[in-house]
Amino acid sequence: MAPSVRERTRPPLPRVPAFTVLNFFLVGYRRTWRAGVFSSFLLPVLTVLGFGVGVGAYVDQGVDGVSYLDWLVPGLIASTALQVALGDSTWPVFSNFQWIKTYYAQSAAPLRVGDILVGHLLYVMFRVLTTIAAFLLVTALFGALRSPWALATLPVAALLGLAVAAPTFAYSAAVDSDSWLALLFRFAVIPMTLFAGVFFPVDGLPVGLRWLAYAAPLWHAVDLCRAATLGVAAEWSVAGHLLYLVAWALAGGLLARRMFRRRLVV
């Protein structure tokens, strides 16, 4: 039987359905990217000027033999990746379930739960990579990158983004009020940013807080980024850092898939 006109004009499904979900979010981003470009460059400029140049002027001896600006920049790279990943994994995910219900529309199409989850996670990684690329460009203009290995911060930032986005997807899918998302930032994100080696070495913390910093995925990315931008050896094993971040990503992905399936499969 010859195919109908509708069947002949219907675009074929891609071989990787998750890319369809990614394309959906990219189409929306195509209409809003101009608003983000300004902040993508303004935020690192103000941060570098305020903390690296302003506060750094009072740190006469530098940190670990380098200027405070050079020491601070890799921490800011990792913390920026964390904030972008969490920002795109909290209210957007929650609204896709509770308010605009995009996920339900996608699940009604020939898309599986895994396709929806992976496609949205790929978009989050895209957002992280583009933001960190802009950050690297700005900090390079300030002369704060001491090694060509600084480019290695891009995959590290992407891995950190996945490591924090995946479990946050699960959290955002599980809560029934967006008040829980504000609590996540207040009691998890802000303390992790302050005490995970971004602004000062964790060696100066009490032992209990120090091990809490080591348990956070942000510190492992900070150590890797600092080793890359300064061209020095990481404080801990590079393989150990990477495996720890991968473990967070895998565990978070499995949990997120379970929560998505609970919400979307009836």
Image (cartoon, grey):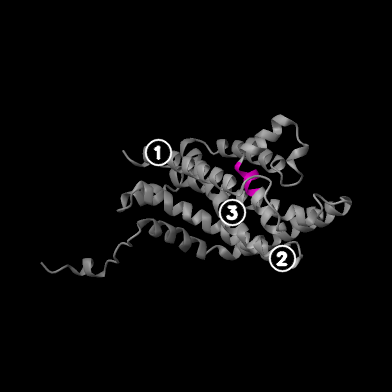
Tell me which residue sits at (62%, 48%) in the image: 221
Q: Which residue is mark 3?
A: 156
Q: Position of residue 206 (x, y in %)?
A: 75, 31
Compare marks 2 and 3 and give the one earlier in the sequence.
2
Q: Nearer the viewer, residue 227 or 181?
A: 227
Q: Which residue is mark 1?
A: 258
In the picture, the disc for residue 140 is: 2
Tell me which residue sits at (45%, 47%) in the image: 96
The segment highlighted magenta reads: 217-222
Q: Which residue of the protein is positioned furthest toward the top in this rendering?
A: 208
Provide the major secondary structure of the magenta segment: helix
Helix, strand or loop at mark 1: helix
In the picture, the disc for residue 36 is: none
Disc 1: CA contacts within 10 A as few (<14), some (14-19) or many (>=20) = some
Tell me, yes or no, if residue 129 can be seen here. Answer: yes
Distance CA(mark 2)–CA(mark 3): 18 Å
Labels 1, 2: front one: 2
Indicate whether residue 241 is drawn in magenta.
Answer: no
Of the residues shown, which amino acid type is indicated by label 3? Val
Disc 2: CA contacts within 10 A as few (<14), some (14-19) or many (>=20) = few
Labels 1, 3: front one: 3
Q: Is residue 166 left or right of residue 57?
A: left
